[in-house]
Image: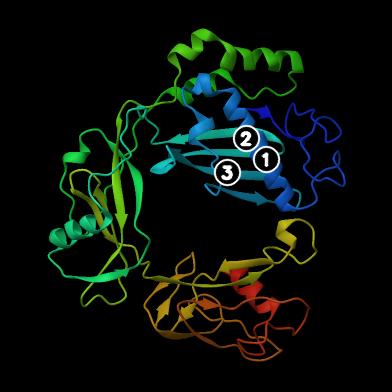
Amino acid sequence: LVKPIMPGDGVGNSLTWSVGALHLHDDDPHGPPQTHKEIQDIALVAVENWFHENDGYLGIDSRSQLFQQGRTRMAVHGSTGEMVQLSAQRTFKGLAVKGSRATATIKKGNLINIGLEQWGEIGEDFDVEPSITADEAIEAVADHAGREVIEGKLDCKSELVILSMVKGLQDATTTTTTSTKIPKVKNDFFSKLRGQLPARVGSDAEDEAETEDEAFGSENNKQDSSAVNEYYDYMLVWKVCPVFVGQQQEMMEAYVNAHTSQVYSFVDTVDYFNNARGSVYPTSNDGEGADGSLQADWPMPYMYVGSQTTTTGGNYEGPGSMTATYRGPYVDMVDNCGTDSLTQSGGINWGGSGGTDCTTPGFGGAGNTHSSRSGFYELN
């Protein structure tokens, strides 16, 4: 898939900021966006329009089931927004459809990838009115777990959601140690899409338009290329997070059928991994692009934290307060500015700061400099 949807340097992209009304900045309606927020706003409108224009081909209703207020997450990469990623939660009759979403990637102004996850048809007669209350759902979880709940105490707000499930899985019994996992189901829609939209270097605008018509405008294609998957069922459930007598750091979350009281999922949502991280210059400090600019909260791999060694992603186990230095099995940083040591609980965050040479964030010792943080990251 290669479809120019906003100005950029991508293959075949001839869009400019001086044409159309893509830009949302009132003071400069025709200039390029100046901030990541402006890039996000423009990209969101562009992706929304693309989905709306291709609803018939995709076999979905993006106008009512996607891009609802507060249900879309976006990330902009690069100082000028070279790549934008989008994840839109699916909704139905105002309720979130857990496990079902749409994704899109824009690179250099071109839409290069879309995805629909766990997307089956939900009939208009789907009942979103529960037969049991949230309190009754909590009682069902207590019976399922064989534990006493503390009345009136919750770790999350009880809410109705629609749960995506593979057909037949709703009759399965859920244990207290595993959640309901939705296996991937093969759908040949996207292979058809890739076959109909090849990335062609040097193609002219007219040829590209014909390719788009073939892929998205043909009534014949609309009949047999739906992205909707027939293997999913949907259940109205209560999401509840009861607190049990004797519960300590656990945060239990359950999904309960809002009509039958069946418990589909009952899990502890606490992430028992902590993380060591800090602000680093990935390759240089020349200020050129992302790899030459200070990047916040990058993982510190293979670092000694207490009696443990972090993973390549900077993770380690264990609650409580622990002490770390820029030392590990492969690298031991020695900084002329001074020594480094940081004691924290719930993770190790070496932070970051402006300045050069011996400038520090004000904690972690005199050796918690840009050079030590960046050097430790790069060498590991």
Residue 256 in percent (x, y) is at 24, 50
Rendered position, 258 above or below 121: below
139 or 377: which is nearer to us? 139
Picture coordinates of residue 349, whole percent (x, y): 55, 77
Residue 365 at least partly seen: yes
Q: Sequence-wise, which precedes: disc 3 or disc 1?
A: 1
- Looking at the image, is 186 positioned above or below residue 154? above
Residue marked by disc 1: 43
Image marks 2 and 1: residues in contact by CB distance under 8 Å: yes
Residue 171 position, x and y percent, is 16, 40
Q: Nearer the viewer, residue 139 or 224?
A: 139
The label shown at residue 86 is: 3
Identity of the residue drawn at 53% across and 19% down: 195
| Cα distance in 3D space between marks 3 and 1 | 9 Å
Task: Tell me which amino acid carries mark 1.
Answer: Ala
Disc 2: which residue: 47
Q: How does the figure colour the protein chain or chains? A: rainbow
Label 1: state its secondary structure. helix
